[in-house]
Amino acid sequence: MGLTLAEKILSRRAGRQVEAGELVVVEVDQVMVVDSIAGSFFKRLEQLGATPRFPEKVAIVIDHVAPAANVEVAKAQQEIRAWGKRYGCRVFDVGRGICHQVLVEERLALPGGIVLGSDSHSTTYGGIGCFGSGMGATDIALAAASGRTWLRVPETVKVTFRGQLAPGVTAKDAALEMIRVLTADGATYMSIEMHLVEGAEALTRSQRLTLANLTVEAGAKCGLVVPSGEILDMYEVPDWLYPDPDAVYAREIEIDLAALTPRVSVPFYVDNVEEVAKVRGKKVDQVFVGTCTNGRLDDLHQVAEILKGRKVAPGVRLLVIPASSQVLEEATADGTLLTLLQAGATLGTPGCGPCMGRHQGVLAPGEVCVSTSNRNFRGRMGAADAEIYLASPRVAPPPPAVAGYITTPEELEVSRA
């Protein structure tokens, strides 16, 4: 019986062949801690009477509330800097960017590796074929103290993306469609193994990271994109890092990218996915472009392409927050930021921004936000009755910013003509 991609990675680390359902102990390549959970992480290590076994394998990223929003947060971040210096662990400080983007840029996550993060969207690393998974403070502390973790080998759902994306459709739309089909708990504690075939191999690293990022919204333990395309040029991909032809899957689905239309996730559940046309005309107060889902350079390019020569509508706030300092530098160098600023966008410090509702764009009662982020739960970005519509940077955010309501780029072109 053949092995899935998740089984291949875990078997390699376990030193023996393992299959879904087994409990294994494996070494990890990187333990990632975000600022919002760092205090609990420190306490757990103290309770264990332990310190990081491999300091070079522990990275702390100040990104969830960066820069500090109040004195208490400032004190917590001060502790992070001191702790990292004391134990020799990497600390990526305010402005470096979102944890997942930073670890990919710094090549701390690599194909065939295992990265544990204290953030649920650590599944993002699967975009390059790295087993990434989110865990709580206790499990993360144990991994840092021992250099290992234990887990149950997940069953696997196979998702085949077939063909090339239709004009105006993005990887975000494909990811939302996948979640719609699987539902919010359709892949609970499973690996979602994504195969790109018949032209879909052309999806870029950024697009693959978007697909893997959103797998946790279907409950997945990890999301792995089978390496192909530019990933083979950017990384030394191990020969063994492919599922066997006779691998056993718990479920298989296919998504035709060429037939896909723009999607939007409607409040208050991520799997509440509709075609953009279904919510056309919804008045918008805020548009947010960024996060670990869609804050990369190609995302900003798509926004700038639509906004060039246009102005943000009166009464609408357009927040743009690059995913990292590298993205910020590149978007500055190629003129993207100038286009966005001239359109009326407000630029934020690289990081998570208002995604988790703690600063830099919290929503007031009754407000409506169109966001390129990954969650639209009640109260996620502020007031409990504020509404969040999740969409791609190409299709939904720029048009609402210009029109003041949800529409499409094509309709904007018609109105300008």
Image (tube, rainbow, N blue to C red):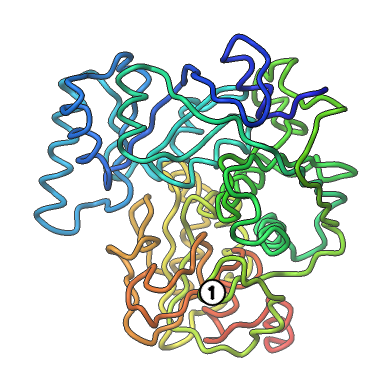
- Using the image, determine if residue 30 lies above or below residue 217: above
Please identify the quadrant where the N terminus is shown: top right
- Mark 1 secondary-structure assignment: strand
Q: How many marks overall?
A: 1
Q: Quadrant of residue 308?
A: bottom right
**Residue at the (72%, 76%) spot, across then down:** 275
Residue 198, given in percent of the width and then of the height, sits at 90, 43
Q: Amino acid at mark 1?
A: Tyr
- Using the image, determine if residue 277 lies above or below residue 197: below
The local crowd at label 1, few if under 14, some if 14 to 19, many if 20 or more residues have their Cα within 10 Å, is many
**Residue at the (68%, 86%) spot, across then down:** 416
Residue 271, given in percent of the width and then of the height, sits at 62, 66
Residue 78, given in percent of the width and then of the height, sits at 13, 39
According to the picture, the residue beneath numbered tag 1 turns out to be 389
Residue 230, given in percent of the width and then of the height, sits at 72, 32
Q: Quadrant of residue 224?
A: top right
Q: Nearer the viewer, residue 180 or 339?
A: 180
